[in-house]
Amino acid sequence: MKNTEFKPKKHKKVRWWIPVICIVIFFMYIWPFYELIIMSIKDITDISSSKMWLSQGAHWENYLAVIKKSDIWIGFKNSIIYTGATIFLEITFASMAGYSLSRGSKKTTRTVRAVQMALLMVPGIITLVGTYSLMVNLGLTNSLLALAFLTAAGGIPGCSFIYMNFINSIPRQLDEAARIDGAGLFTTFFRVILPQLTPLTVTRAIMIGIGAWNNYLLPLYLLNDSRKRTIILVIRSAFSINGGDRDIAMACATCTIGILPVIVVYLLLQKKIIASQIGSSVKG
C-alpha cells in the first residue's frame, strides 16, 4: 500500500523585493501630483521655497480665484463637447467598420488589416502640416465638431482593428438568425452584435475620452478663438500669463482642477475596465 500520510504543503517564500518595487513605482507615479498640489496651495511669495512642504501654510484661495474665472468654465464646456463628439464618432464608425471587416471576405480583411497596421506605424505629427492646410482651406478651423471629426478619423484605424478582432469571436450564426427573423444589417449590428461589445465599448470610450481631453497639439493649431479653447489650452494660457514664477501657484491650481474630471471618471469606471479585460481574455 502507498503511504497516505498527510504532508503539509510548503509555503512559498515571499520575495521581499516585490512589494518594495511596487512601493517605489507607486511613489514615482504619485510624486508629480503631490508636487502639483503643494505648489497650487502656496502663497505667491512662497514659490521659491522647497516643493516638498509648505513653509507659510496652505492658501486655498488660489482655487477660489481660479473657479471664479470664466476661462476655466469655457474650457470645461468646450472640452466636454469636443470629447463627447470624439467618443461618439470614433466608437460608432470604428465598431461598424470592425463588424463589416469581420464579416467580409478574408482577402479584403487581410488587405485592410495590412493598411491599418501601416497607418498605425505613422506618427500623427508627420501629417500635421498637411492636415492644418486642409482644415484651413476648408474653413474648418475654430470648430469643435470639425476637430472632433479629425481626431476620431485618426483613431478609427486602431479602434476598428480592436473591434474586428473582438467580433471575430462572436459566432456568425447570430447574424444568420437575426436575418431569418427579418432584421436588416444595421438592426443586426446595433441590436444583436453591439450589446455584446459593451465592456469593450466602455473601455474604448474611456481611453478615447482621456486622449481627447488631454489632446494638446491639434487644438493648439486649430482653435485660435479664445471662446473655443479647451481646458488644456486654458492650462497652457495659465502657465504663460505674465511669465516667470509669479503665476505658478495659480497655474498649478488651474492644472489640478483641469485634470480632476479625468481622474474621477477613471476611478468611477475602473471596474468596467477590469471587466472588459477579463471579458476580452475569455472571448479571445
Image (cartoon, helix red, strand yellow):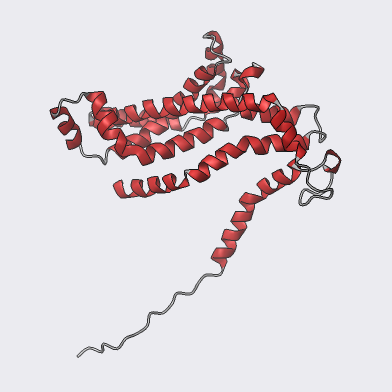
Q: Work out whether residue 209 or residue 126 is closer to the camera in this orientation and state it.
A: 209
Above or below — where is 99 with respect to 278?
above
* Nearest the eye: 92 or 54: 54
- Determine if residue 251 is in view: no
Q: Residue furthest right?
A: 45
Instruction: Looking at the picture, tell me which residue is in the foreground, 174 or 284.
Output: 174
**Where residue 204 sits in the image (x, y, percent)?**
43, 37
Drawn side of residue 104 relative to residue 147, left or right? left
**Which image quadrant is residue 228 in?**
top right
Residue 35 located left or right of residue 57 = left
| Residue at point 49%, 25% (across, down) | 151
Residue 138 in view (yes/no): yes
Q: Is residue 276 above or below residue 179?
A: below
Q: Locate residue 179 relative to residue 49 in the image: left or right.
A: left
Q: Residue furthest left?
A: 180
Q: Residue at x 31, y 28 (%)?
A: 111
Q: Position of residue 245 (x, y in %)?
A: 81, 36
Considering the image in quadrants, where does the N terminus appear?
A: bottom left
Could you tell me which residue is drawn at 56 percent across and 42 percent down?
Answer: 263
Image x and y of residue 30, in percent:
63, 50
Q: How many marks?
A: 0
Residue 18 x %, y %: 54, 64
